[in-house]
Image (cartoon, rainbow, N blue to C red):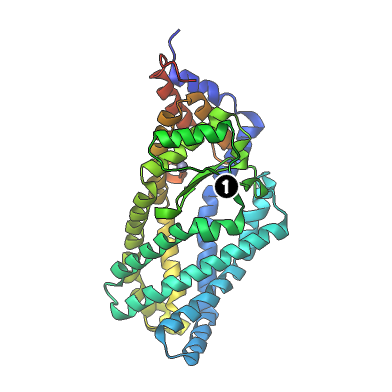
Amino acid sequence: MAFDPELATQAYMATLNGAARAKSDAYFEGGYWIILWDAVVGILAAWATLKLGWARRLSASVQARTKRKWLQSFLFALPYMLLTAIITTPWVLYTGFFREKQYGLMNQTLPEWLGENSIGVMIDALVVSLLFIGIHVAIRRAPKAWWVIGSGITMTGLAIIVLISPVFIDPLFNEYTSLPDGQVRQSVLSMARANGVPANDVLLVDASKQSDRISANVAGMLGTTRVALNDNLMKQPVDEVRSVMGHELGHYVLNHIYKLLIAFTLVVAFCFLIAARALPWMLSRWGQGWGVTSLEDPAILPMAFIILTVIGVFLTPVTNTIIRTHEMEADLFGLNAARAPDGFASVAMKLSQYRKIEPGKWEEIIFFDHPSGHTRVLTAMQWKAEHLDAPDVR
Ligand SMILES: [Zn+2]
């Protein structure tokens, strides 16, 4: 009997139904609204700091404290970021903790989650404040062309973060250890050697302390690149682990980190270009009322946030599509490397725990940053259909 990829895909889809499918659909579809409400909450928080005069007062106090412009930018941005994090805490608690708990996707207690979230907030605040020093210098020196220099500064900042994350940031949240010797380690390292990945170690990360989500990742660049699988993935059959790790090796071999860095710099440049036009307009329209009248004032930061947040929402399908097309490439690379299409299909089904399995075509384009379960299973079954006679395909 001929093997039909469509029928094989439907057979996989039929294994997820009833309450389990309704739950993962509801979880993921709720996320569409969260994109919008995240933006609304962020904009309201920034607007409140302007309207209530907090931004103006904070700016006046840092300007009284130092005459150094770059230091004013930094000293404004750091407390400002912490202030908005406090204002938005109830919303972040709901989306980040209680909602996750409600869907059975959270293994942490509230104090544990709050501890990690605070570290995250502080890192974000520090990164934004450092970037704002450079970008604000560019804004003051080149009020029309700052978006070009600002994008360059942001790209440099992003590259540094990618470079240092595996060494300084990731270990703040999880423990990374060498994967113990055994079938999984041997076969992942063998796949790495066969595909030109200079790895002599595979790391295991204790992600189950946060949730039961199955995952793996490649992080770092230049000398800090590392491949890690999480302990939830490690509990799955070896063909499923190999399939996921083949995908991760694909990210490495296809230089996705560098390509994404370039792609996102272009997105940032576009956002900054719009902001460079919108900021002066916003200043002349509302600046007087908010006590912020010049681009020299560090209190333009909340205004820039409002503008960038609005653009960010509209660019969601673009950023998702940039990531998703790279993920699709990694899927195909992984199928060729692991040669276990049913392993890949069954692990793709398990990822539906936190991702809607069968979205509509446009729904996938707009909201998905990874191929949907249906797309992934179909891709695997099409690969299988072309390799039915291959003796080594399991
Ligand atoms: Zn991936």
Please give the residue where the numbered disc 1 appears in the rendered image: 30
Residue plotted at (47% across, 82% down):
290
Residue plotted at (51% across, 58% down):
167
| Residue in the foreground of this view, choosing between 9 and 340 | 340
Residue plotted at (64% across, 42% down):
212
181 vs 368, left or right, is right
| Residue in the foreground of this view, choosing between 186 and 263 | 186
81 vs 102, left or right, is left
| Residue in the foreground of this view, choosing between 222 and 307 | 222
The quarter in which the N terminus is drawn is top left
Q: Secondary structure at mark 1?
A: helix
How many labels were placed on the picture?
1
Residue 300 on image: x %, y %? 42, 77
Residue 166 on image: x %, y %? 51, 55
Q: Is mark 1 within 8 Å of ligand 1?
A: no
Residue 257 on image: x %, y %? 39, 50
Looking at the image, residue 313 lies above or below residue 391:
below
- Pointer 1 local density, CA inside 10 Å: few below 14, some 14–19, many at least 20: few
| Residue in the foreground of this view, choosing between 71 and 360 | 71
**Residue 223 visible to an observer of this rendering:** yes
Looking at the image, residue 68 lies above or below residue 317:
below
Q: State the image quarter where residue 384 is shown.
A: top left
**Residue 371 visible to an observer of this rendering:** no
332 vs 245, left or right, is left
Q: Identify residue type, mark 1.
A: Gly
Looking at the image, residue 126 lies above or below residue 203:
below
Looking at the image, residue 180 lies above or below residue 17:
below
Residue 275 on image: x %, y %? 35, 68
